[in-house]
Amino acid sequence: MRDPRNDDFIGFAKSQWAPWLICAVAVATLWVVYSRVLPFSDGFLGHDYSLFVPNLVSGFIKYKVNGLFSIPWFSPAQCGGFPFFPDANVPTFSLPQFLTLIVDPVTALQVSFVAFAAIGFLGAYLLLRNGFNCSLGASLLGAFIFGLNGFYAHRFVNGHLAFHAFALAPVSAWGVLYGLEKGWREHVIGICTLALSLGVMFHAGMVHGIPPILLGIAILLLVYAILGHWTWVPWIRLGAGGLLGMALSAVKLVPLMALLKQFPRDQYALPGFDSIANAIWLTAQTLFIYPPMAEIHAHMTHGSILLQKHEFQYGIGIVPALLLLIFLVRQAWKPDETTEMRVVWAVWGGGLLLAIPVLLNYYNPWWSAFIKSLPYFKNSSSLVRWYATYVFVLPLLAAIILDYLELPRKRFVLFFALGMVITWAQAFNNDLTYMTTVLGRYHPAKQVAFWNKIKFGEEQPSIKFMAIAFDAQTFQPVTPIDRNDAMTDSSSQIMCYQSMMGYGLESFPMLPLMPKPPLSIVGEGVLNVKRPECYLYPEENACKPGDHFTPDHLQTAKDFLFYKDYEFNRPPIHDAAVVMSLLALVTTLSALAYALLKKDQSLSRP
């Protein structure tokens, strides 16, 4: 590989400001391109913010009413009452949620977008520079490609807020590779960094995004071995950090699994491409150029849901493909050399792991049935998000290849400059018209006004009515995109947007909810409000999913309708998970602080 000490390839290369300057260019590019839809000029946001903005405001209310150190297990804001913190779509412990304590939800989204874009670039740079020991130029190019990837940006502006934590993927890999040949401090820092990254991802709601990232880390570790670093230490770190990250997430993981037991979401058939060749070709176009939606829809079969254009925004630009092609051609022309068997096995292993996202999106009756029978995959409606593995890995491989080519200085500068310009041009010319022509849009004005009233004490939030939206002409129930905004009018939307119960609420035990005040008597003498604990732990609370509060629990129902916490029965594993996550958090932060402090002291000694 190119000697990382030979970094005088361009005028400012030795300046400590080079990474910060390129980071600023990457973040500024993302902001210029995507701020025009975050929000649009008329105030609208991407369609799925109709789920996440109400959730952010509900989380703000729960903090306001119950305090910062309470866990908001339930909320009356949607569906007549539903589990809140256990919901995978609720980012309770996340930067966007914490920012709503200070600024309105839209501003919180904008700040989070910029902050995590910068984290993504800097994490990729540190991983390449310190983890793989790449040259400055290759590290900057790889980080620039990752920083401008379309997956992060398009997911964010379309309202898939959970995927803002995808920017932590390089940070988590850095934790696995940082300072492997040094002392215990580096091991502690690496394990804690990985654990915290995974914990943030899980608490942000990026449940389906973590396995593709772990797959990407495994691929990178095989690349690390192929480069001559044969050691089990990073794999041990990955295991230790993964277990600690799971402990940090246990407080949300245990109730989430209980909720999925009631709503397994296994009714959706998995879509897939009709041949391996089409899967490879269309995936390559999606990654390196732009998703050809007409061809994708023509060759993707069997899905229960038509996947729109935003689901195929994984662009990383053409540069990684060009560098990979140059590398393969050069390898083909190299004279035959004896290759160690362990290198051969590592190459084959990496290739097989790289094939997994493509294979998961190939449809064959027996193959798809097998995938759908597996515990993790059966809860999915599609597996195209596994392409995120490529978004994570390929920019880093491009940087490693650039160094591996060992180009003369002038040619290296040319490749670096062309790579930066081409990547920037492709990112800057991103087409966002599909957000207005294919997808609906959501206006957050009601939620922002509601947030302001609550923040400044002008309104006490509560639920006074169970609402259903009706068509003005046919008088039939409808589901407008802003139906979850009923909470701003002190109502809980019965026909809510809650994907945990299915995109069409297929699993929602709606009856006997009625469009009446919540303390009205409905059905067989129950109150018109759900008991959300029955969705989590029905046996412990002597009820079944969808049960209502009874008149005997009138005061508890009243407290719930004012967003107040209340006691409920839970199994021992629930309380154990809470204690485990608290202990894991204290241990992780204490160990990280101690290791950093000791490192600083060691550096300060003569």
Image (cartoon, grey):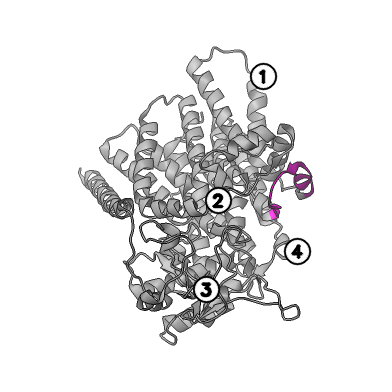
- State if disc 4 and disc 1 touch (CB < 8 Å): no
Query: x and y percent of residue 213 in the render?
Result: 50, 43
Vertical placement of residue 108 versus 324, above or below: below
| Secondary structure state at the residue bearing disc 4 | helix
Q: Which of marks 3 and 1 is in front?
A: 3
Q: Indicate which label's residue lies in the foreground, 3 or 2.
A: 3
Foreground of the two, 137 or 59 = 59
**Foreground disc of the pair 2, 4:** 4
Image coordinates for residue 457, horizontal then vertical, percent: 41, 85
Alpha carbon distance from label 1 to label 4: 48 Å
Q: Which stretch appears magenta?
A: 294-309
Q: Can residue 10 be seen in this view?
A: no
What residue sits right under mark 2 in the picture? Answer: 147
How far separated are the C-alphas under marks 3 and 4?
A: 43 Å
Could one spot residue 298 in this view of the protein? yes
- Residue 146's place in the image compared with 32, above or below, is above
**What's the amino acid at mark 4?**
Thr
Per the image, the residue denoted by label 1 is 333
Image quadrant where residue 395 sits: top right
Name the foreground residue: 141 vs 55: 55
